[in-house]
Image (spheres, rainbow, N blue to C red):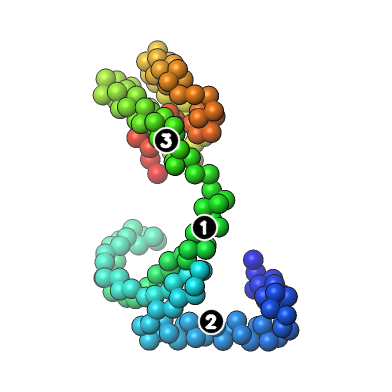
Amino acid sequence: MRWRELVSRVSARSRIGPGQTTAVLNALIEEVIEALGQGDEVAIPGIVKIESRWQDARIIRSVKDRRRVSIDGRYVPRLRAGTRIKQVLMSRTPQTWRDPAHQAAWRLAEALIGDLELYHREQVPSGLTAKMAPDEIERRCASSFGPAWALVRDTFDTAVAEPIRSQQQHLPCTARRRWGSP
């Protein structure tokens, strides 16, 4: 949502003119900035709590020439989402991790992938990335492990019900977490 749309929506909801709404929102922004500048924290109930925290000096690598650069300590903003924001966002997100059947499927996938790694370490596929689709990871594992992957897949499919498998692809996701790069 852009600034104009925010002003328009708040104006319509509060039944005050857009000019007054803009003035109120600008005043809010100035007060938040001033409070943070003085070291105070600002809480907007249900939405956010904003505070500043000290970040120690550290050594980083320059993006341009990869040389080491020292950065001084500084204050940085820290935002913590409010309860209402968390609830709204959680309602948009599938919560399969809360289901005991998904937890059991994940544990089985961890055990099977761990066994593959233990007994077939030299065949572990390389180049798995977070951007890869589960089907692509599945194909790479099948080509790397051959019959061992087919046995793992059959064991998993036999033990885990179809609705659970269709909601979350635990086996390739576990392989990506175990053997992939971020």
Q: Identity of the amino acid at label 2?
A: Ile
Residue bearing the label numbered 3? 100
Residue 158: quadrant of the picture: top left
Q: Identity of the amino acid at label 3?
A: Pro
Q: Identity of the amino acid at label 1?
A: Gln
Camera-side mark, 1 or 2: 1
| Residue 81 in picture, x, y percent from top left | 46, 65
Task: Label 3, secondary structure: give it.
Answer: helix
Q: Residue at x 43, y 73 (%)?
A: 50
**Distance from the alpha carbon under mark 1 to that under mark 2:** 25 Å
Q: Residues within 10 Å of mark 3 (few under 14, many from 20)?
A: few
Q: Earlier in the sequence, mark 2 or mark 3?
A: 2
Furthest-front residue in view? 100
In this view, the residue in front, 156 or 38, is 156
- Screen quadrant of the C terminus: top left
Task: Label 2, secondary structure: give it.
Answer: helix
- Screen quadrant of the N terminus: bottom right
Q: Residues within 10 Å of mark 1 (few under 14, many from 20)?
A: few
Residue bearing the label numbered 2? 29
Label 2 with label 3: CB-CB less than 8 Å: no
Residue bearing the label numbered 1? 87
Task: Label 1, secondary structure: give it.
Answer: helix
**Distance from the alpha carbon under mark 2 to that under mark 3:** 45 Å
Label 1 with label 2: CB-CB less than 8 Å: no
In this view, the residue in front, 104 or 28, is 104
In this view, the residue in front, 138 or 105, is 105
Residue 122 tag number: none
Q: Is residue 25 above or below residue 146?
A: below
